[in-house]
Amino acid sequence: MKTIKVGDQQLDLFAHDVSTSTPPAVRPTAPPAPPVEAKPVVHLAPPPAPVTPPARPVLPSPPRTDDGPPLRQLQLGSHLVEFALRRSTRRSIGFMIDDNGLRVTAPKRVTLAEIDNAIRAKQGWIVSKLLERGERKVQRQQRPPVAWVDGAVLPYLGGEITLRLHQAPRHRASFQRETNELHVWVTPTGSEQQLKEKVKGWFQHEARQLFEVRLDVYADKLGVQYDSLSLSSAGTRWGSCTIERKIRLNWRLIHFALPLIDYVVAHELSHLLEMNHSPRFWATVESIYPDYDGAKQALRKRSQELPVLFQ
């Protein structure tokens, strides 16, 4: 699941921690064969052309920034992987994979060679997760976007609501639970982007109100207190928790059914007791959310089925 940072520590949902490892043993190469006497050349039929495997999804890479360090590259089998490296005071090397690719957090004392060896030791897991993320990204891009017209259907709390448009200035969006209709007022000259912003603002308002209620419920079950809640807009990173007890939840969770939201809430609050993904952490999650594994799988599946609302 996520990585832990110390200082400005943050543990994100779906990261994975590993410790440094030693490089794999290299077999000595065989001595060259002794020269042989040249023989007449015999022309044989050419061997069959190798079968070209189908193209595989391109591994996503972390976004480049002008002020950040350059990305590092490492060849893992047939894949050239780019990753962002961050140094911290943590004790072990941590990996975090999301739609932007691989990010590595390592102690300051660890050498670059040791970091590369740790990545090689986990290369099967890393490559499979990067390919999986790449495939999900392609699937999302191939999904038809929502048509922003009167009568459009939008996902909300595991179900669907209907968008109703009205022409009038300066009216806030209003939701009628009896009919499951979201009423939004727009001006005749308003743009689609302005409509999207109004709908997004309503979703975010609903998300914050619901998250605060569910955080209080599960914090009471766990006997913990969090410092603050903020909303994120990450692609598929649903939540994170810092050592300062700050909780971040993705407002897009409002599209999912309440049990899936509760799983993410229980997950992040459990990090207040265990800032890792150890067996003790999962036992903590299980104590307040027994079917966490089923919810985790359902969240991943459902996230692939959501229509494209906001880029």
Image: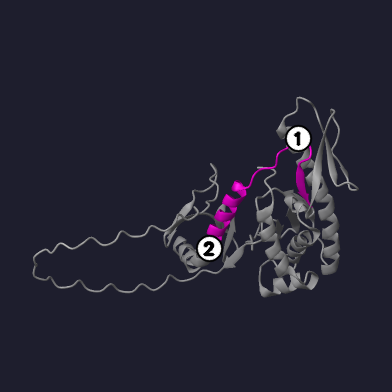
Q: Amino acid at mark 1?
A: Leu
User: Within the image, what quadrant is residue 158 found in?
Assistant: bottom right
Q: Does residue 237 show up?
A: no
- Reply above or below: 186 against 279: above
Which residues are the magenta region? 127-156
User: Within the image, what quadrant is residue 181 found in?
Assistant: top right
Q: In the image, residue 288 lies at what x, y percent?
A: 80, 70
Count of numbered marks = 2
**Is residue 142 part of the magenta span, yes or no?**
yes
Question: 48 left or right of 257?
Answer: left
- Reply above or below: 275 against 198: below
**Is residue 199 part of the magenta span, yes or no?**
no
Q: In the image, residue 205 lies at what x, y percent?
A: 82, 45
Q: Residue at x 58, y 58 (%)?
A: 97
Q: Residue furthest front?
A: 45
Q: In the image, residue 260 lies at what x, y percent?
A: 76, 61
User: Dot 2: few (<14), some (14–19), or many (≥20) neighbours within 10 Å?
Assistant: few
Q: Residue at x 78, y 73 (%)?
A: 287
Q: Which residue is mark 2?
A: 128
Color encoding of the figure: one colour
- Reply above or below: 176 against 167: below
* Image quadrant containing the N terminus: bottom right
Quick one: SS at disc 1?
Answer: helix
Question: 72 left or right of 292?
Answer: left
Q: Which residue is mark 1?
A: 195
Q: Residue furthest top?
A: 189
